[in-house]
Image (spheres, rainbow, N blue to C red):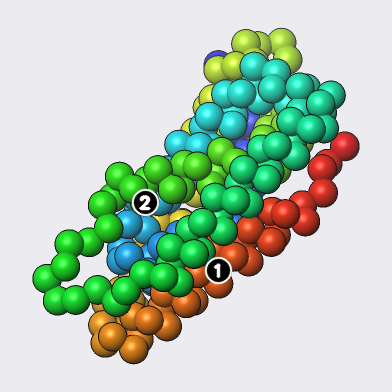
């Protein structure tokens, strides 16, 4: 389906992209600080699942719809801004956890990562700009998109999860009420900054 040499060329490019700090990495960092390693890993899995959805939609032609309908891009973007601000508010208002309190469910962190990724329209535009450079039009396009997208998603999951696990370990060591209050504020600030970044995102033409 894919020329092995092309795949070998794609791997280091994908790794470099995954290692570049961005909104996904910062989101996992915030989840790890506030809710621990398990939530961070789940959030990273949600982000990777969202990336695969973006890849599939890009291959099916949604990118053309976004390019033709600027309001669609803006609608998705503002939904993402609202969701991130809501997460920031929840983090700022959350009370410090007490001993024995149940952790934040992994499914909730997964859902948050999925929604954050899906409501970032820049992801699908990035996919459309990057992956086609490695796609052979003489071969079936959708399977190639899915394979390249899977490589990006798996690499992103591993790297973002490791960042979140490190942050989660740091959060566990700062288990005092005062430290947890500040961790909530830091996490809230991260989510709010991501919302601002998304709000001022310019559409790529």
How far from the left and from the top, in percent, is residue 135? 69, 24
> Which residue in the structure is indicated by mark 2?
109
Residue depicted at x 63% and y 58%: 195
Q: Which residue is mark 1?
A: 190
The quadrant holding residue 36 is bottom left
- The reply, left or right, for residue 74 in relation to residue 100 is right
Q: Quadrant of the C terminus?
A: top right
Q: Is residue 129 visible?
A: yes
Residue depicted at 32% across the width and 65% down the height: 35
x and y percentages locating residue 85 in the rendered image? 56, 58
Question: In the picture, residue 1 is in which quadrant?
Answer: top right
Labels 2 and 1: the sequence-earlier one: 2
The Cα atoms of the two marked residues, 2 and 1, are separated by: 15 Å
Question: Where does residue 80 sit, x and y in percent of width and height?
Answer: 60, 46
| Residue 91 against residue 116 in the figure, above or below | below
| Residue name at image x 81 percent, y 26 percent | 69
The secondary element bearing badge 1 is classed as helix
């Amino acid at each position: 389906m894919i020329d092995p040499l092309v795949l070998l060329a794609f791997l280091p490019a994908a790794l470099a992209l995954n290692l570049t700090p961005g909104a996904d990495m910062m989101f996992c960092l915030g989840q790890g600080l506030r809710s621990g390693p398990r939530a961070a890993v789940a959030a990273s899995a949600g982000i990777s699942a969202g990336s695969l959805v973006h890849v599939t939609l890009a291959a099916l032609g949604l990118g053309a719809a976004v390019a033709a309908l600027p309001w669609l891009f803006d609608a998705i973007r503002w939904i993402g801004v609202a969701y991130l601000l809501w997460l920031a508010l929840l983090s700022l208002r959350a009370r410090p956890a007490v001993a024995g309190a149940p952790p934040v469910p992994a499914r909730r962190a997964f859902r948050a990562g999925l929604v954050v990724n899906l409501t970032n329209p820049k992801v699908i535009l990035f996919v459309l700009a990057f992956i086609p450079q490695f796609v052979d039009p003489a071969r079936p396009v959708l399977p190639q998109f899915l394979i390249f997208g899977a490589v990006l998603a798996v690499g992103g999951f591993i790297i973002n999860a490791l960042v979140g696990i490190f942050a989660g370990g740091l959060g566990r060591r700062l288990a005092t009420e005062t430290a947890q209050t500040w961790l909530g504020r830091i996490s809230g600030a991260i989510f709010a900054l991501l919302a601002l970044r998304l709000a001022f995102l310019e559409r790529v033409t």
